[in-house]
Amino acid sequence: MKNEIISLLSGVIVENDFSVSFATLCQCCSVSEEQIISMIEYGIIEPLEPHMNVTYWQFSGDCIIRIKTAVRLQQDLGINLAGTALALELLDEIKSLRQQVHSLQRN
Amino acid sequence: MQYKDYYKIMGIDKKAPQAEIKRAYRKLARKYHPDVSKEKDAEEHFKEVGEAYEVLKDPEKRAAYDQLGANWKAGQSGFQPPPDWDAGFEFHGGTTTGDHVNAADFSEFFSSLFGQRAGGFQGSHQAQHTRGADSHAKVFIDLEDAYHGASRSLTLRTTVLGADGRPEVKNRTLNIKIPKGIKEGQNIRLQGQGSPDISGGKAGDLYLEIEFNPHSIYKVKGQDVSLELPITPWEAMLGANIQIPTPAGKVDLKIPPASSSGKRMRLKGRGIPAKVAGDFYITLEIVLPDKLSEQEKSLYQALQREAGNFNPRAKLGV
């Protein structure tokens, strides 16, 4: 095993990025424009403001994380986009229910 | 090196037909997928199952592995495959046959058996792009770190290709700045700290998902923080100025007279800091002393006689 120590790194909070361009989104997530368009069609993500010309589309930083999760689910579990969209929605719901249970338990 | 019982990992019999292996894999992959599972070791399990499947789904590799297993006795420590363990088996190149698993994540056991043959250790999705894959990790921080910012040291275990083309495990220690104001579930992106690109392009990014360690006194929801504040019956009735803790330090709180248990108070902007900072909520909880002295008891009895007209159950109709 090798050890390597790197000095203090600072990054950016992905979710605080309020507008990510279409091109940046593709690049960050290593996906094609077509893949992103299909994800929008299935309601997995949506652009901040609908615009006729896709090159002007802007997205919130959360979309990066959501697309990456969607890609992992698709590749690892072999589910199609409709299934991925459903899985993501259910996961969101479970997350908020878990939070509620947690806060009720502590009361 | 640890011998890995791939059948045990998959929870199947050594004689299981190929179709059953596939079924078992799919079920376990869903169960342990890091995006789905809440189990602590989900990621480890997921990788292990992926590795087991990589071998068992391929009849050639499975047969070779079975022959090896026949000579292996449980309880033996230190495993080394015999030099000609795979004699008589023909392998076909490109071992990661389509499915989703990233061979670079596999164990030393796997690479010692199949490593050199695997030819181009790369995940299926890395190949299409001119940059390395992004990596992900979870970081646990304290709520106080989100208030003040902090630096955290994190050790990532990654498998990289050595000079001889064989994968080797490398520990990477990163010192990471946790930005002030980060919320639970948010991700920090560190550019160029993901996997290196095999063809010499840019390295991928590292994404760190932030989770808060459970706190002994505060609860966090989004950027709001709340505290249950115990007070005495006389503080509740008469009002009081008391000191309360917040993650940013102690503050003075004025409790208005006649505050019932369960009353919620808000300190605006004292939640997790941001341009529009979160709020700090206080829920009052009246706490009674365990025991009363004779004199205290008689004072309460005097109070009972004096305040006899007060009926807190009037709304209940009794």
Image (tube, coloured by chain):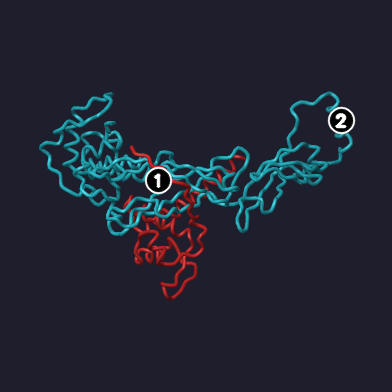
Looking at the rendered image, the quarter that the C terminus of chain B falls into is top right
**Image coordinates for residue B273, horizontal then vertical, percent:** 61, 53
Chain where mark 2 sits: B
**Image coordinates for residue B275, horizontal then vertical, percent:** 61, 58
Give the color of chain A as drawn: red
Label 1, residues with CA under 10 Å away: few <14, some 14-19, many ≥20: many
Measured Cα–Cα span from mark 1 to mark 2:
60 Å
Task: Return the residue nearer the eye: B195 or A35.
Answer: B195
Q: What residue does disc 2 label?
A: B299
Question: From this viewpoint, is residue B24 visible?
Answer: no
Q: Which chain is cyan?
A: B
In front: label 1 or label 2: 1
Determine the residue positioned at 80% across, 42% down: B240
Q: Earlier in the sequence, mark 1 or mark 2?
A: 1
Does label 2 lie on the same chain as label 1?
yes
**Image coordinates for residue B23, horizontal then vertical, percent:** 28, 44
Label 2, residues with CA under 10 Å away: few <14, some 14-19, many ≥20: few
What amino acid is found at the position of numbered circle 2 in the picture? Answer: Leu
Going by the image, does B239 lie left or right of A14? right
Q: What residue does disc 1 label?
A: B34
> Mark 1: which secondary structure?
loop
* Total numbered badges shown on the rendered structure: 2
Q: Residue furthest bottom?
A: A52
Determine the residue positioned at 43% across, 51% down: B207
